[in-house]
Amino acid sequence: MKSTPFNTPARIKFPPKNADFKGVNTDGYQKGNRMRAKPLVMTLAICLGCLNLGLTPPVQGARIDVVVDHGIEKDAEDQGRAAVNGIIDFFQSNYGVALERDMRIKFSCDKLNYKKAIQNWYGLGEAQANFHAQNSKGLQSQGTLIVNLGELRGNFPQLFVLCHEMVHHFQGQISGDRHGSLRWMSEGMADAIAVHVLETVGVKGARRYKESWKNNLQKARDWPKLDQLHAPNEWFAAAATYGSYVTYKTSALAVLTLVDWKGYPALFAYLRDLKTASPEAAFYQAFGTRLADFEKQFRPN
């Protein structure tokens, strides 16, 4: 390894006890054996001005370490690093949020190495690591991101998973790691902001995502209720019952509804308020409505 200073699981099993990682799978995306070099992955860096691929945008008090499996091609590695830089710059330029917490990122080349990275970097046992390797393409916990780029094919899936996990990193930084108490908010926000980043810089596949999510959910027999998506065990139970895609996109559309009301700044106000307030109080302060009322009234279609 080299180091420098996103299919719905039809028979998903519950994770081992105490498993609580923020992750994303990639329902409906094609899988490949290696991360392929894609010119459009450079879009983030080009559009945001981060053209020095080996350099990290200046941030105060934050260090970024990227570890790359040998199975990932050099061009793809450079493009992955450029994407990381572009996402960080996007948060600073568009949301006024600078990176202040150290970040470690692992780009894995296949599922086996992804599983090993989960074991080694998170200190998990065989059963926990196998669960996450089978049911996700990316994980984030306490400033450590692991992304299985080798099994993602196409610019949009690769960038989407990386963006999603980096959103989780910023959530933890802003909220003091108190963002996980409402799982639908943390996961839905990660999906919504990830696609907002890709849509803004013009990555192919990001347009009309909201309509696509709605259309796909209309085909679902049912969807989970938001008040059933608070704790990690509730989230995994919903994924087992309704499918991972339905669970993620129901949450993402709920967050986009809040964005339609109050804009993206309200999401970050919510995270900041979580440092000193309960989720219910922070939600009310940011969005002007009671959490229980919103959860009861929301419908994804």
Image: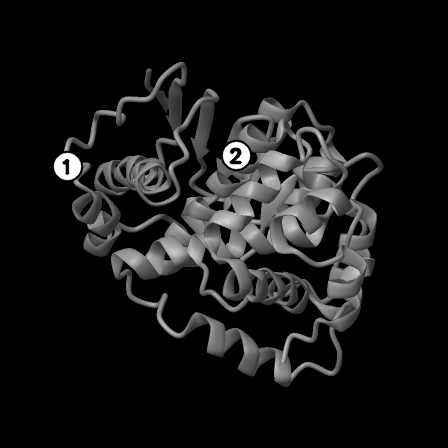
Q: Is residue 220 above or below residue 84?
A: below
Camera sees residue 187: yes
The kind of residue tagged 1 is Leu
> Does residue 197 lie above or below 206 as drawn?
above
Q: For mark 1, give the secondary structure.
A: loop
Which residue is labeled 1 in the image? 51
Residue 187: give x, y in percent of width and height. 61, 51
- In this rendering, the answer to whether 32 lies above or below 250 is above
Give me the C-alpha separation between circle 1 and circle 2. Answer: 23 Å
Q: Position of residue 138 (x, y in %)?
A: 53, 44
Report if the CB atoms under discs 1 and 2 are less than 8 Å apart. Answer: no
Label at residue 83: none
Identity of the residue drawn at 21% across and 26% down: 54
Residue 63 is left or right of residue 231, and the answer is left
Number of marks drawn: 2
Instruction: Give how far across and how far down residue 99 sits, in percent.
Output: 41, 27
**Taking the image as drawn, is residue 1 in sight?**
no
**Quarter of the figure with the N terminus:** top left
Find disc 2 in the rendering and name its residue.
Answer: 169
Q: Classify mark 1: residues with Cα within 10 Å, few (<14), some (14-19) or many (20+).
A: some
The residue sitting at 66% across, 56% down in the picture is 288
Assign the C terminus to one quadrant of the image: bottom right
Left or right? Give the position of 67 relative to 86. right
Taking depth in this image into account, of 129 and 265 the one nearest to the observer is 265
CA neighbours of label 2 inside 10 A, class few (<14), some (14 to 19), many (20+): many
At x 22%, y 25%, the residue is: 55
Looking at marks 1 and 2 on the same chain, the residue that comes earlier in the sequence is marked by 1
Indicate the quadrant where residue 22 lies: top right
In what element is the residue under mark 2?
helix
